[in-house]
Amino acid sequence: MHHDLLFVLVLLFGIFVLVMLAQQIRIAYPIFLVIAGLAISFVPAMPKVHLDPDLIFLIFLPPLLYEAAWYTSWNDFWKWRRPISLLAFGLVFFTSFVVAFSTSHLIPGFTLGLGFLLGGIVSPPDAIAATTVLKKLKVPKRLLTILEGESLVNDASSLIVFRFALAAVLTGTFEMHDAIGDFFWVTLMGIMVGIIGAFVFYLIHRYLPTTPQIDAAVTVMSPYALFMTAEVFEISGVMAVVTGGLIMSYHSHKAFRSGTSRINMQGVWSTLIFVLNALVFILIGLELPDIVQGLGESSIIEGVKYGLIISAIVIAVRFLWVYPITHIPRFFSATIRKEPSSGWKGPLIIGWAGMRGVVSLATALSVPLFLNDGTPFPHRNLILLITFVVIFITLVVQGLSLPLVIKLVKLEEIDPIEPSDIQQTKIQLSLNQLAIQYIDEKCTTLKEENELVDIYHKHLHESKATEHKRLTALLEDQYHPEEIQAYHRLLLEICKQQRELLFSMRRNKKFSDSEIRKAEEQVDLNELKITGLIH
């Protein structure tokens, strides 16, 4: 027990060091951690790591999907539902189909059922890797929304393909009519579980006397409860988690009664998701020796060769799918033609962002050791090695080259979107106007009798005038992006100086620690607003 705990702590500390190093050399940390994990796995004294697929699905997948759904805009998700659906469902099925027929002809003894099994494993791009790379780059918001939406629901479709293929291999029978019916059943029922679960958690947060700490703890429990409830009824846990996350995010302003709860949750979830992401990606690299050791009847060279071929197939299939679904609908729909076209550059980025990850590996590891009759599962170890090669090639090769591709194509924003500074200024003007109107309509007597209210009322008018000047300057393009960045840097430096002043106040004992902490929280909120504008 002590040895395992020490190993976990050392691994976590090593991960944090590697992430800091990745930031210094400007490589997305999921890619860097996979490479580092692979290198560390060859160290002779390194303990062998064996990933339990149930652990991956149950411990890692629900919170990762829930967090991704939480920060996905429902309005954007619904707006781009057509390309998201075509990628998350159509592309997954198309990829599985092509991989199935390719491998059944390419690999000796590989049946069509095993091909569909492998297709279900390698078809879904990773939910974290692409967005982690793209969020730090200048990418049109439409593309980010489509990729995030695809990653939210493609795991459900790929797992359904995998389960039907696995059942066919285990039993030796497969009925297409039953499979299609089961697909719609498990998908729709998973969505229903998500809706009902989100309603229950909404009631808990909204009407029970929760605290910010309890609110944060319940949100951590929510994805696990949704996932396990769906799995008990043998329906899609992924769709339940995604649906629940989208609904709770959309209604969070009503569900959580205090801003403290939302700020506290943000800290809890950002830390939790970072640790889970980092662990998952380094474990992918560390898992290779365990995969190779069990390869058995197939040579490593053959497995790598097949993995490289299938990697090329899944990359090519993604491009063959993305370009037609981007442009063909424009010929048949006048409504779609009204949307700005993404040309050839947008599909290129989406096509090259199809990086595979933890769900593919966990799905491959969940392939049973034996068939129903007790005989060894055919080509199980070869399937594991091929999956690892596909993950490595798509994640590392595509992930490292994606920033260069974006830089070379010089992709501009496709849809007209106001800069963050302008949007934030307009929002603040609306909030100030509401406060002024409320005081004028309902607190006139109080304003005359209470000097503090009168001062606040005057401050709102002054702030409104200032925000109007700021908005006018931004709309008239008086400031270049470099000047705005310099302005942001100045504000961040002022926050830093304010923290140092508060520290000196604490050291000199001029004010109570509790009041200084409140002032520090306000400085933190100001800094968060600035960094939100930057990112």
Image (cartoon, rainbow, N blue to C red):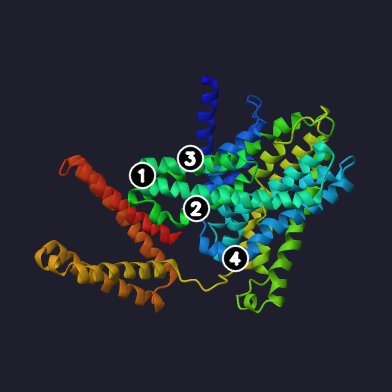
Mark nearer the N terminus (2 vs 3):
2
Please name the residue shown 68% across and 59% down the image.
Answer: 87
Q: Amino acid at mark 4?
A: Trp
Mark pair 2, 1: CA separation: 22 Å
Kindly identify the residue that appears in the image at 30 percent across and 56 percent down.
Answer: 494
Q: Position of residue 114 (x, y in %)?
A: 82, 42
> Few, some or many C-alpha atoms within 10 Å of disc 2 (few <14, some 14-19, many ≥20)?
many
Q: Is disc 3 placed on a helix, strand or loop?
A: helix
Q: Which residue is mark 2?
A: 70
> Going 49% across and 49% down the picture, which residue do you hit?
198
Whether pointer 2 and pointer 4 mark residues with C-beta atoms closer than 8 Å, the reply is no
Whole-number angstrom distance, CA of label 2 to CA of label 4: 17 Å
- Is label 3 in contact with label 4 (beta carbons under 8 Å)? no
Q: CA distance from mark 3 to mark 4?
A: 30 Å
Pointer 4 residue: 80
Q: Determine the CA span between mark 2 and mark 3.
A: 14 Å
Q: Amino acid at mark 1?
A: Leu
Badge 4: residue crowd in 10 Å (few <14, some 14–19, many ≥20): some
Q: Between tags 4 and 1, which lies in front?
A: 1
Closer to the N terminus: mark 2 or mark 4? 2
Residue 389 appears in the figure: no
Q: Which residue is mark 3?
A: 221
Query: Which residue has dot 1 on it?
Result: 208
The nearer-to-camera label among 2 and 1 is: 1
Of the residues under marks 2 and 1, which one precedes in the sequence? 2
* Rendered location of residue 534, percent (x, y): 43, 60
What element does badge 2 sit on?
A: helix
